[in-house]
Image (tube, rainbow, N blue to C red):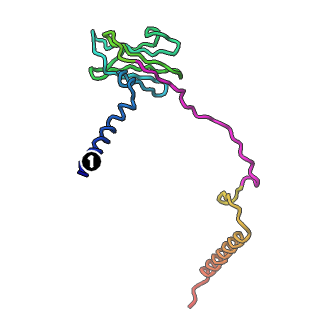
Amino acid sequence: MHNSRLLLRSGLTLAAAAALPAALAGPSAAASGISVSTTGSTVSVVTSACTQINGSWGTAALLTSRQANFAQGRQVALSGTSVSQSAAWSSVSPGTYTVVVVCSSGSTAGSQSVIVSSPARPTISATSSPAPSRGVMGGLGGATRDYGPLTLGLGGALVGAGLVATGWFLRRRSRPYRL
């Protein structure tokens, strides 16, 4: 009994999850029959609703908000196969447009609004940083850190010890061998 309730609940959950994308898409996307997308300043439309008549699939038009009918828009012939037909417009300026697809049979495959946004341009701005308080720090190795007197003293002592050891080694080497 407990297992059957669990199976019933999981079945209902799976059915609801399967129906969710169709419900979220809404009736306009499902009934439209076209899919419109933008990439930069290019608008493209894809449909599978048209059939080829006399070598033509149909025509798609890109309408601005000031254009009232299909004939006023930028028209492009559909191209493709029996599975999918498409059209594209390049160099479209930013704004809101309506894409309308009319098949060669005269029926409207669908219409859909699309927003073309302006391309993101890198902004160049001049920034000023505060002037360095001590100027450019040069020196051996292009040191960029200010060392204290203890570090400098120990470094000097090591260099001096190295010089004394080198002198002692060279002087000892120049003497003749003694037994």
Quarter occupied by residue 102: top left
Q: Residues within 10 Å of mark 1 (few under 14, many from 20)?
A: few
Q: Residue at x 41, y 18 (%)?
A: 111
- The residue range painted magenta reads 111-136
Q: In the drawing, does residue 52 fall left or right of residue 32?
A: left
Residue named by callout 1: 5
- 138 w.r.t. 86: above or below: below
Q: Is residue 117 magenta?
A: yes
Q: Is residue 13 above or below residue 102?
A: below
x and y percentages locating residue 46 in the rendered image? 36, 23
Q: Position of residue 23 (x, y in %)?
A: 37, 31
Q: Secondary structure at mark 1?
A: helix
Q: Nearer the viewer, residue 62 or 127?
A: 62
Residue 74 sits in quarter: top left
Residue drawn 41% across and 20% down?
Answer: 88
Q: Residue furthest front?
A: 1
Quadrant (top left/top right/bottom left/bottom right) for the C terminus: bottom right
24 versus 58 height, above or below: below
Is residue 85 covered in magenta?
A: no
Residue 85: x %, y % from top left: 33, 20
